[in-house]
């Protein structure tokens, strides 16, 4: 029970009633928003978990292959081989609006990178070969095949990692929005609306009280006036009586 | 629609291979330095930065400070020595905070 400090008059009462109306409507809307956000969040988070498990599995595989590669080649050879390429991986990023939360979405810009070559006539193996030859950034001489396998595994992880990135960022942003919305819903439900209701009740009660006080005061005044009148008449009557 | 670059930050054994895919590789094992690098990269139109779990675990600011920002997206990847699955636990914790129950744990029951 927390009554706001306002003057108990009709003006304030009307203002507070308006506020209470808005608060109730806002509360209902925000509650709906929270529920919908949660629904989206739940499906996203499941996808997120799947993707993360997959990325972890594939990266474990990559690490195993990398260990093999390191075992058969000196460190310098690997480093030189890998540093010979450019750092030119560019992604397309798009903003999506999910329940008025801005979320990013990443795509591979260079589609050929993932083996989606435009020519469909090449079979799967053709594509795979193409990928081998095109997207290994170093020359094959002097570098053992183990490193190729490691890099090819990484190529397999890349699309999954990019999807994971989109999904995980989205879940993070949604989680923040859910927390914010929930705080708003709770503060409306447990603080603002009860406070307004209490204040309105106390104002109505005070006003009724004032009215009763007014009535009694009027009655009292009426009594006083009547008494005075009676007394006056009585004295007048007495005077008349004695005159006669 | 715009273009972003991709970077990977971590210890040399875990991240070197990503250089082969054309990502920018930053090699560091110092969590503080890693955070500095992320700040640097985020000003240079890097929209997606992968960080190894080890670094993120040792310096929570890496994840927390970029949580509310749309870009760059900081995503954890396992390193070749992490066994603790920090990223997965972080996901569980996030779900727990957002909706009050750890939904992913129960998953096995009704899947």
Image: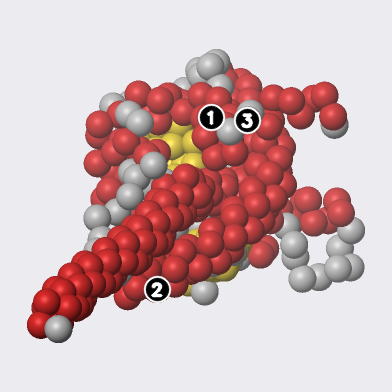
**Mark closer to the observer (1, 2):** 2
Q: Which mark is residue B101?
A: 3
Which of the colour schemes (rainbow, by chain, secondary structure, one colour) is used?
Answer: secondary structure
Q: Which residue sits at x=40%, y=73%?
A: A14
Cβ–Cβ under 8 Å for marks 1 and 3: no
Query: Which disc, if any, is residue A220?
Result: none
Residues tagged 2 and 3 counted as in contact (Cβ below 8 A): no
Can you identify the residue that label 2 sits on?
A14
Q: Residues within 10 Å of mark 3 (few under 14, many from 20)?
A: some
Q: Tell me where residue A110 sits by quadrant.
A: bottom right
In this picture, residue A229 sits left or right of residue A208: left
> Which secondary structure lies at badge 1?
helix
- Residue topped by disc 1: B93
**Residue A104 vs residue A62, the one in the foreground:** A104
Q: Residue at x 69, y 30 (%)?
A: B104
Asked if both marks, 1 and 3, belong to the same chain, the answer given is: yes
Say which residue appears at 31% left-offset and 66% top-offset. A219
* Image depth: mark 1 or mark 3 in front: 3
The reply to whether label 1 and label 2 mark residues of one chain is no
Disc 1 versus disc 3: distance between alpha carbons?
A: 9 Å
Residue A111, given in percent of the width and then of the height, sits at 66, 64
Q: How many angstroms separate mark 2 from mark 3 (CA)?
A: 42 Å
User: Measured from the top left, where is residue A67 in percent x and y?
Assistant: 57, 20
């Amino acid at each position: 029970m927390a009554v706001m400090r306002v003057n108990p008059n009709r003006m304030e009462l009307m203002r507070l009633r308006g506020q209470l109306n808005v608060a109730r409507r806002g509360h209902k809307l925000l509650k709906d928003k929270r529920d919908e956000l949660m629904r989206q969040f739940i499906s996203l988070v499941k996808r997120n978990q799947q993707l993360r498990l997959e990325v972890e599995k594939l990266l474990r595989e990559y690490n195993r292959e990398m260990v093999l590669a390191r075992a058969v080649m000196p460190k310098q050879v690997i480093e030189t081989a890998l540093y010979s390429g450019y750092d030119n991986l560019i992604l397309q990023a798009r903003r999506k609006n999910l329940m008025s939360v801005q979320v990013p979405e990443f795509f591979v810009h260079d589609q050929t990178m993932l083996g989606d070559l435009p020519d469909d006539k090449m079979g799967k193996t053709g594509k795979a070969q193409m990928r081998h030859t095109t997207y290994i950034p170093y020359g094959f001489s002097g570098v053992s095949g183990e490193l190729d396998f490691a890099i090819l595994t990484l190529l397999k992880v890349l699309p999954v990692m990019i999807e994971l990135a989109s999904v995980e960022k989205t879940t993070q942003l949604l989680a923040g929005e859910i927390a914010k919305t929930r705080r708003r819903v709770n503060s409306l439900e447990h603080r603002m609306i009860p406070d307004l209701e209490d204040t309105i009740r106390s104002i109505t009660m005070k006003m009724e009280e004032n009215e009763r006080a007014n009535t009694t005061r009027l009655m009292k005044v009426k009594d006083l006036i009547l008494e005075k009148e009676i007394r006056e008449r009585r004295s007048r009557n007495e005077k008349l009586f004695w005159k006669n | 629609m715009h273009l972003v670059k991709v970077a990977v930050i971590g210890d040399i054994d875990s991240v070197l291979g990503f250089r082969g895919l054309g990502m920018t590789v930053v090699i560091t094992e110092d969590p503080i330095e890693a955070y500095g690098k992320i700040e640097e990269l985020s000003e240079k139109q890097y929209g997606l930065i992968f960080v190894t779990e080890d670094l993120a675990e040792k310096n929570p600011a890496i994840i927390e400070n970029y949580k509310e920002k749309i870009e760059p997206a900081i995503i954890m990847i396992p390193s070749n020595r992490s066994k603790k699955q920090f990223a997965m636990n972080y996901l569980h914790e996030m779900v727990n905070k957002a909706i009050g129950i750890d939904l992913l744990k129960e998953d096995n029951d009704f899947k």
